[in-house]
Image: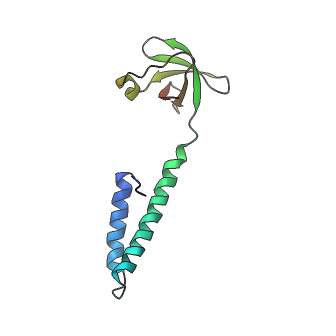
Amino acid sequence: MIVKIHDSWHAAATYYLDTKASTFETNQTDTEAKSQALTLFQALVTIAKLHMDENKDVPTGTVEEVLPNSLFRVRMPDDELVLAYLAGKMRLHRIRVLVGDTVELVIDPYGGRARIVRRL
């Protein structure tokens, strides 16, 4: 199975394997060294996957009203109304958001507007 991971994770894994390759015992066979290196790399991939799965609790809401300048009034599941704007990639690709659509939001930690990042 081929897993694409972030470049920094790949660089860290390559560096780790290069430094560990010099510390492998000299009496190990080539297959034992490869097997040990593969085990280390699989451990790093597992850590990378766990790191990517941390952000699964993304807030969602339903668009209640469309306002000018790509602004939307979104109702959260707890009946709170939030003012949200359309993310740049969604504007760039001209993804349309209509009243009644369920959207994924990124909430501003300072209490400003939310950003709509995905239409579900």
Q: Position of residue 118 (x, y in %)?
A: 48, 30
Snapshot quadrant of residue 10: bottom left
Q: Position of residue 54 (x, y in %)?
A: 54, 48
Q: Is residue 38 above or below residue 120?
A: below
Q: Is residue 7 above or below residue 100?
A: below
Looking at the image, how many numbered discs can be counted on the residues? 0
Q: Position of residue 13 (x, y in %)?
A: 37, 63
Query: Residue placed farthest to the bottom in the image?
Result: 27
- Say if residue 29 shows up in the picture: yes
Query: Residue placed farthest to the front in the image?
Result: 1
Q: Nearer the viewer, residue 89 or 111?
A: 89
Q: Is residue 6 above or below residue 81?
A: below
Which residue is depicted at the point 49% across and 52% down?
Answer: 51
Q: Is residue 54 above or below residue 10?
A: above
- Say if residue 107 shows up in the picture: no
Please indicate whether residue 88 sits to the left or right of residue 105 in the image.
left
Please indicate whether residue 28 sits to the left or right of residue 46 in the image.
left
Q: Position of residue 65 (x, y in %)?
A: 55, 13
Which residue is depicted at the point 48% across and 49% down?
Answer: 52
**Picture colour scheme:** rainbow
Snapshot quadrant of residue 9: bottom left
Which residue is depicted at the point 33% across and 64% down?
Answer: 14
